């Protein structure tokens, strides 16, 4: 049998044959300053997946009425949660730790797997990290958006960035994208374990538990976005995994802005109304996030608490995201191993 001809002696080394996994999260400004937040918001709010209004209408609004004013308020919120270490942003910190933990687990399974991470908006960018994986010899890459519930505003936007990055590559790697995992038993089980552990450590028992998801405009749902349905299924499965009666876990939506109607019920209005219903002790979790960030640490754990207590509530607790807990790393390994089937 003939053997392949050896490479010429002067042929440059071409690393190949490795598998890449790119974890993609939403994004974060580089610093808790108005200038850094303005750069971040300009990129984020210019994404047509986020704002579907025609750029001819939206860009003047963005540049004349939002970017001159909103960054100062948002930067102040970021300063409340900013870390003192090199990561700064909690989202960057936990996403990095998730990638490192997954990398250690996958290296024991297959030495040729390289795990990296990127942000859809801000740095490190998707294009930068894809190119880094390609240079490391990854000719097959799994892009994994870290959103349990699918939405065009999140999952699809992350993969849009992946596809655009590949357009610039002369020698493209083979590519897979991971599906949502809102109903995967490993995800639901990890959430249930976190809720049990947190509530069992409290000196009091909540009278209501609220699952607060990031919202989207209602017209996106009306146009066919499955996000609401995915959130509803996660909520139902989580309640069942905890053994709670139907309706014990309340689903709400946070982080709306602008005058349009968003998915309801709204989290802030729910927290404000609960004391009038006789609920004095409440626990809140954010199942749409795998890592704590501005929307969980500032909007929920701080402002949510203030809203509930100001309305007459007595006890409030925020249940942290999975972050870099062993359950989070185990979950990612289960999901990634499934998506790498046939490549490993």
Image (cartoon, helix red, strand yellow):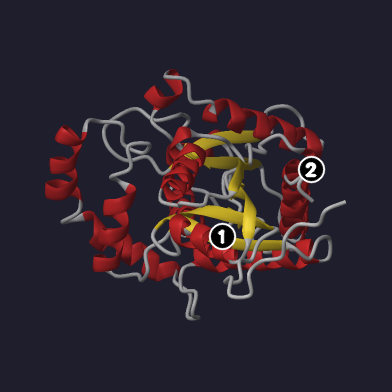
Is disc 1 placed on a helix, strand or loop? helix
Is disc 2 placed on a helix, strand or loop? loop
Q: CA distance from mark 1 to mark 2?
A: 20 Å
Q: In this orientation, which residue lies closer to the viewer: 170 or 337? A: 170
Q: Residue shown at 31%/31% (left/top)?
A: 52
Image quadrant where residue 338 sits = top right
Image quadrant where residue 203 sits = bottom right
Q: Residue shown at 46%/29% (left/top)?
A: 264
Q: Position of residue 253 (x, y in %)?
A: 48, 37
Q: Residue furthest front?
A: 2
Say above or below: 198 vs 55: below
Q: Which residue is mark 2?
A: 342
Number of residues whose C-alpha sits closer than 10 Å to that of mark 2, classed few (under 14), some (14–19) or many (20 or more): few
Q: Residue shown at 58%/25% (left/top)?
A: 229
Image quadrant where residue 230 sits = top right
Say above or below: 265 vs 294: above
Left or right relative to 281: residue 6: right
Q: Position of residue 274 (x, y in %)?
A: 52, 38
Q: Position of residue 91 (x, y in %)?
A: 51, 62
Say above or below: 286 vs 93: above
Q: Residue shown at 48%/47% (left/top)?
A: 162
Q: Which residue is mark 1?
A: 134
- Earlier along the polypeptide chain: callout 1 or callout 2? 1
Q: In this orientation, which residue lies closer to the viewer: 95 or 234? A: 95
Q: Is residue 320 visible?
A: no
Q: Is residue 17 visible?
A: yes
Number of residues whose C-alpha sits closer than 10 Å to that of mark 1, classed few (under 14), some (14–19) or many (20 or more): many
User: Do the residues under discs 1 and 2 have CB atoms within 8 angstroms?
Assistant: no
Q: Residue furthest bottom?
A: 85
Left or right relative to 301: residue 210: right
Q: In this orientation, which residue lies closer to the viewer: 227 or 316? A: 227
Which of the numbered marks, if any, corresponds to residue 45? none
């Amino acid at each position: 049998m003939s053997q392949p001809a050896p490479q010429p002696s002067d042929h440059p080394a071409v690393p190949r044959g490795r598998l890449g996994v790119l974890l993609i999260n939403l994004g974060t400004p580089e610093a808790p300053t108005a200038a850094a937040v303005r750069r971040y918001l300009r990129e984020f709010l210019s994404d047509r997946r986020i704002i579907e209004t025609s750029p001819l209408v939206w860009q003047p609004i963005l540049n004349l009425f939002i970017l001159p004013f909103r960054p100062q308020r948002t930067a102040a919120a970021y300063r409340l949660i900013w870390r003192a270490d090199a990561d700064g942003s909690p989202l960057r910190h936990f996403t990095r730790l998730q990638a490192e933990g997954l990398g250690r687990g996958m290296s024991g399974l297959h030495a040729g797997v390289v795990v990296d991470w990127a942000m859809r908006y801000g740095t490190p960018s998707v294009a930068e990290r894809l190119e880094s994986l390609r240079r490391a010899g990854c000719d097959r890459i799994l892009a994994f958006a870290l959103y349990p519930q699918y939405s065009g505003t999140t999952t699809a936007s992350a993969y849009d960035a992946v596809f655009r990055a590949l357009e610039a590559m002369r020698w493209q790697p083979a590519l897979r994208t991971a599906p949502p995992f809102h109903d995967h038993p490993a995800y639901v089980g990890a959430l249930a374990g976190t809720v049990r552990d947190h509530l069992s450590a409290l000196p009091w028992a909540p009278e209501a538990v609220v699952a607060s998801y990031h919202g989207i405009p209602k017209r996106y749902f009306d146009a066919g976005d499955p996000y609401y349905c995915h959130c509803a299924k996660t909520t139902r499965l989580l309640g069942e995994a905890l053994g709670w009666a139907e309706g014990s876990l309340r689903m709400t939506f946070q982080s709306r802005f602008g005058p349009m109607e968003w998915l309801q019920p709204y989290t802030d209005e729910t927290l404000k109304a609960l004391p009038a219903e006789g609920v004095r002790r409440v626990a809140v979790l954010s199942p749409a996030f795998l890592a704590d960030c501005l929307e969980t640490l500032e909007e929920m754990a701080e402002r949510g608490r203030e809203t509930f207590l100001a309305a007459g509530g007595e006890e409030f607790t925020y249940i942290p995201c999975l972050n870099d807990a062993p359950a989070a790393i185990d979950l990612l390994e289960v999901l990634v191993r499934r998506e790498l089937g046939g490549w490993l």
